[in-house]
Image (cartoon, helix red, strand yellow):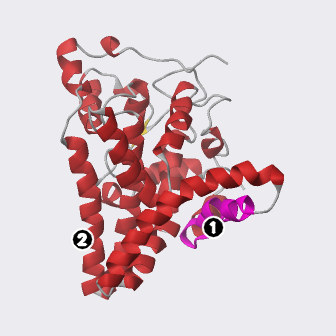
Amino acid sequence: MPAAARVQPKDFFTSEEWEPLIRRSSWKGLALVAHAWGVIGLAVAAAVVWPVLIPLAVMIVGTRQLGLAILMHEAAHGGLHPNARVNDFLGHWLCAVPIGASLASYRPYHLSHHKYAQQAEDPDLPLSAPFPVTRASLRRKIVRDLTGQTYFKQRIVPLLRAGRRDPNTLEAAQVTARSVAPFFLVNGVLVLALGLAGLWWAYFVLWLLPMATWFPMVTRLRNIAEHACTPALDDPLRHARTTRANLVERALIAPYWVNFHCEHHMFMYLPCWSLPKAHRLLGAKGVWPRMETAPGYMAVLKAASGKPV
C-alpha cells in the first residue's frame, strides 16, 4: 500500500509564519526534560513529607513518566535539540532509558507509523483498530492498567519468555538483555540515591508503582485519543485527532502538547512547543472544520466506548 497522504506547509502557512514554527531550539528541549524531572522530584518530595498525598503523587509521576515518553518521541523526530548527538543523548538516557525504552528501537518503529498512518502497514494500527468497544470492555482495560496487569503482560512476560533456554528464542533473549541493561543501570542509581537518603521505599511506591499503573493507563487514553475512531479516509487532516485538553487533563493525561496530534501528523517535524501556535494559526485560517478534533478526553472516551452491547 502507498504511504499515507501528506500535506505541504506552504498550503497552510506563509514562509514568515512557517519559519518560526519549524525552528529548533538549543534550550527549550533541555528545559522540558528538566521540567519533567523537576515535577517528578517535587511530587516525590511532597509525598514523602505528606504521605496523604501519595495517591496524587502516583498520578503526577505516572503522567510525567508519560511525559518522558513524549519527549523521547520528540527526540525521535530530532526536535529536542538542533545538535543530533545532544538530541539523541537527551532522548535516550534521560527520557527513554528510565522508563524502560530505547530511542534507537523506537525511532524506526515510530517513523513507520507516520509513513503508513492508519493503513495496514501501520505498526500502531492494533492500538486503534479495535475501537469502538463497549463501555464494559473499556472499563476492563482501565482496571487491568491500574492493577498492574498490563505492565506485567507488556514488560515482565516478554522478559520471562526471552530467558528460556530455547534456541528459537536465543536472539530475542539477547536483544531483551541489551535493552533492559540500561534500564536496570539507571533505576539502580535511583534506588541507591533514595536508599542513601533513607527513602528506599519511595522508589517502589513513587516511581515503580506509577510506572506499573498510572503510566499504562494514561498511555492507553492517549493512544485512544490520537487515532481511535478516526475516519477511515485517505485524508491527512482526519487520520489523527487533536483533543482540546483542559488544565487538569494536561496535568494528568496529556503533558507537553501531545494532545495536538492532528497537527503533529500534518507537520511531523514541528517541535512540540510549536504545535499550539500552529493550531491557532490553522483556526484563524478556517482549517479546523476540516480537521479531526474533539472537545476533551471524556468526549473521546465516550465515542470510543459507544459500541452497543
Q: Is residue 193 above or below residue 284?
A: below
Q: Residues within 10 Å of mark 1 (few under 14, many from 20)?
A: some
The tag on residue 228 is none
The stretch drawn in magenta includes residue 17: no
Q: Position of residue 234 (x, y in %)?
A: 57, 20
Q: Position of residue 250 (x, y in %)?
A: 32, 54
Question: 196 or 205, which is in the foreground?
Answer: 196
With 10 as the anchor, is 66 left or right in this view? right
Question: 208 or 227, which is in the foreground?
Answer: 208
Q: Earlier in the sequence, mark 2 or mark 1?
A: 2
Task: Residue 302: tell me if it is visible.
Answer: yes
**Which residue type carries mark 2?**
Leu
Q: Residues within 10 Å of mark 2 (few under 14, many from 20)?
A: some
**Which residue type carries mark 1?**
Phe
Q: Is residue 185 above or below residue 198?
A: above
Q: Residue at x 38, y 52 (%)?
A: 93
Image quarter hosting the C terminus: bottom right
Question: 257 or 37, which is in the foreground?
Answer: 37
Q: Residue at x 60, y 53 (%)?
A: 305
The stretch drawn in magenta includes residue 152: yes
Separation of marks 2 and 1 at Cα, in angstroms: 28 Å
Quickly name the residue at label 1: 152
Q: Quadrant of residue 248?
A: bottom left
Q: Position of residue 124 (x, y in %)?
A: 60, 40
What type of secondary structure mainly makes up the magenta span?
helix
Q: Quadrant of residue 284?
A: top left
Q: Residue at x 67, y 19 (%)?
A: 1
Q: Which residues are magenta?
A: 145-163
Question: 64 or 174, which is in the foreground?
Answer: 174
Quickly name the residue at label 2: 42
The secondary structure type at the circle numbered 2 is helix
